[in-house]
Amino acid sequence: MLDFATALANLLAAARRVREFEHLDLLAANGRVLAHDVISPLAVPGFDNSAMDGYALNIADFNSPPADFLLSQRIAAGEVGQALAVGEAARIFTGAPIPAGANAVAMQEVCTVNDGRVTVTMLLKNGANIRRAGEDIAAQSVVLTAGTRLGAAEIGLVASIGCPTLPVVPPLKVALLSTGDELVEPGKPLAAGQIYNSNRYALHTLLQTLGCAVTDFGIVADDRAATIELLTMAAEQNDVVITSGGVSVGEEDHVKAAVEYLGSLDLWKIAMKPGKPFAHGRIGEADFIGLPGNPVSSMVTFLMLVRPFLLARQGVTALDPVSLPLIAAFDWKKAGDRREFLRVRLNAAGQIELFPRQGSGVLTSMVWGDGLVDLAAGQTIIAGDTVNYLPLSALV
Ligand SMILES: Nc1nc2c(c(=O)[nH]1)N[C@H]1C(S)=C(S)[C@@H](COP(=O)(O)OP(=O)(O)OC[C@H]3O[C@@H](n4cnc5c(N)ncnc54)[C@H](O)[C@@H]3O)O[C@H]1N2
Ligand code: MOO
């Protein structure tokens, strides 16, 4: 068994980066990975402007408040005013350009207006309530680097520099196969000994969340010829083939043998819990990833290994999960011989609680939990100890 850190490092080293890119409209780019750096052609803000509704003036015109100014003009956002003469102030609104000659804005709450004149009751510093040109973005600066995952903030930022499209990595084509003769699709009746295929739905949803183009091959029979046939087809048409189940040691586990027959396996069995029977290899040009059949194992191995692998293939560099040192509100006395990922959640006191049933078939633990505790092999916990908490919300 390979230790988890080595397995992850090997997997990431084997992640061949996609070189193609396509240009997408901003609104179609959510969830995609940026293919090239984005350089701003302009400064943002493009001009000094008012941060407040109020009065633009020159602080050289008053020694001590209250000070009185002639109201010479009105400048709304989108308009350009005239230069101020000595002793003049301009009515100005948030976002409007600061007129020449002004060096501060008095917010209207500290001003009174009477008869075409404004009285300012507060002393102002040079630059007060002025947003400077370029204070958000300098012209010609890199605003986003290649490999960034695009979300609302990134897309809004690119709109703010006037770019209508972005160069993004095309979605990875991922084939998903569920193995197991016991599996039945939801909506159909169960016979004795059968179970519903839950991995297909959990894994498909995770792949969608990562922006992959998923082709779902459904359930593969526990049969060597059928497994070889479907794996061949899936590998020809996709960048990555992911299976669940059938990679362990039983006679009914045909996936491993089929992959070794069609291509090669470079990784099998990892010292992690849940998820020991994890496999990686190649079938032709496609990556093969074999996930364990137990539902929690397949989800946890996906989050901890497949997610960074798929992101690395798209050129993403920020791959480490968020890990927060937090206080455990539980004991964990059985030191394991594998790195372990416990299903836990944060309580109102900001401490970590353990889901009582940690079996790799107990999918309710993933719903109850909002995170995983990352436990080293051999580690035990006594309530009050600091543990590494990985929020699930940061693993999508
Ligand atoms: N002698 C040994 N037996 C097992 C070992 C071992 O080391 N030696 N490892 C155990 C561990 S740990 C796991 S995890 C499983 C993994 O085996 P496979 O990945 O080959 O998965 P299966 O045997 O096909 O299934 C395991 C379990 O999960 C259920 N399953 C499978 N697919 C689905 C699905 N799509 N949706 C819901 N549930 C699914 C399946 O019915 C089994 O209960 O092997 C252990 N055995
Ligand atoms: O290693 Mo298995 O995935 O725990 O049930």
Image (cartoon, rainbow, N blue to C red):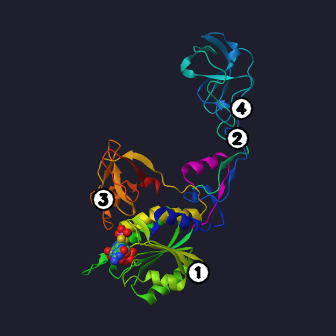
- Whether residue 161 appears in magenta in the rendering, the answer is yes
Q: Which mark is residue 284?
A: 1
x 37%, y 80%: residue: 180
Q: Is residue 197 visible?
A: no
Earlier in the chain: of badge 1 and badge 3, it is 1
Label 3 close to label 4 by CB (< 8 Å): no
Cα separation between marks 2 and 3 = 55 Å
Look at the picture and state if 283 lies above or below 169.
below
Q: Name the residue under label 3.
A: 334
Magenta span: 150-171
Q: Name the residue under label 2.
A: 138
Earlier in the chain: of badge 2 and badge 1, it is 2
Cα separation between marks 2 and 1 = 47 Å
Q: Which of 77 and 105 is in front in this view?
A: 105
Q: In which quarter of the image is the N terminus?
A: bottom left
Earlier in the chain: of badge 1 and badge 4, it is 4
Q: Name the residue under label 4.
A: 80
Label 2 close to label 3 by CB (< 8 Å): no
x 59%, y 50%: residue: 154
Cα separation between marks 1 and 4 = 63 Å
Q: In which quarter of the image is residue 125?
A: top right
Q: How far across and how far down the image is residue 63, in percent?
A: 66, 10
Earlier in the chain: of badge 4 and badge 2, it is 4
